[in-house]
Image: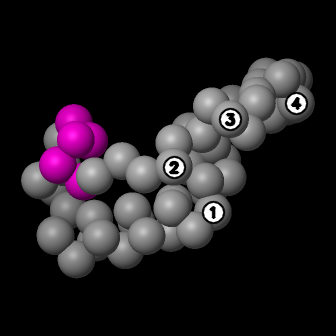
Amino acid sequence: MFTDNAVEVIGSAWRRDPELLVDALLDGADEVSRRRLKTTRRPSLLPVHIPADRIVGFG
């Protein structure tokens, strides 16, 4: 589905700014859900690093 380079670029972006992943996951969510999920989420729940080979569908 994605080239190795694309997976690396995406992974690097998410490691630099985990909010990109949160925003991608909330894409299409209604405004109430988006606000609720973004305000109740704790930064400690964000992954520090997930190797590409551990992500289902990649690698």
- The mark nearer the N terminus, 2 or 1, is 1
The residue type indicated by label 2 comes to Val
Image spot of residue 11 (x, y percent): 39, 62
Residue tagged by mark 4? 39
The residue type indicated by label 3 comes to Ser
Q: Is residue 21 left or right of residue 37?
A: left
Mark 3: which secondary structure? helix
Give the residue displayed 51% in from the left and 62% down from the top: 15
Residue tagged by mark 1? 17
- The residues tagged by marks 2 and 4 sit, at their Cα atoms, a distance apart of 20 Å
Residue 31 lies, with reference to residue 2, above or below; the image says above
- The mark nearer the N terminus, 4 or 3, is 4
Q: Main secondary structure of the magenta part?
A: helix
- The residues tagged by marks 4 and 1 sit, at their Cα atoms, a distance apart of 17 Å
Give the residue displayed 30% in from the left and 70% down from the top: 8
Residue tagged by mark 2? 48
Mark 4 neighbour density, 10 Å: few (under 14) some (14–19) many (20 or more):
few
Label 2–label 3 contact, CB within 8 A = no
Residue tagged by mark 3? 44
Give the residue displayed 16% in from the left and 70% down from the top: 4
- The residues tagged by marks 2 and 1 sit, at their Cα atoms, a distance apart of 10 Å
Label 2–label 1 contact, CB within 8 A = no
Looking at the rendered image, the disc whose residue lies closer to the viewer, 2 or 4, is 2
Mark 1: which secondary structure? loop
Image spot of residue 34 (x, y percent): 79, 31
Mark 1 neighbour density, 10 Å: few (under 14) some (14–19) many (20 or more):
few
The stretch in magenta equals: 52-56
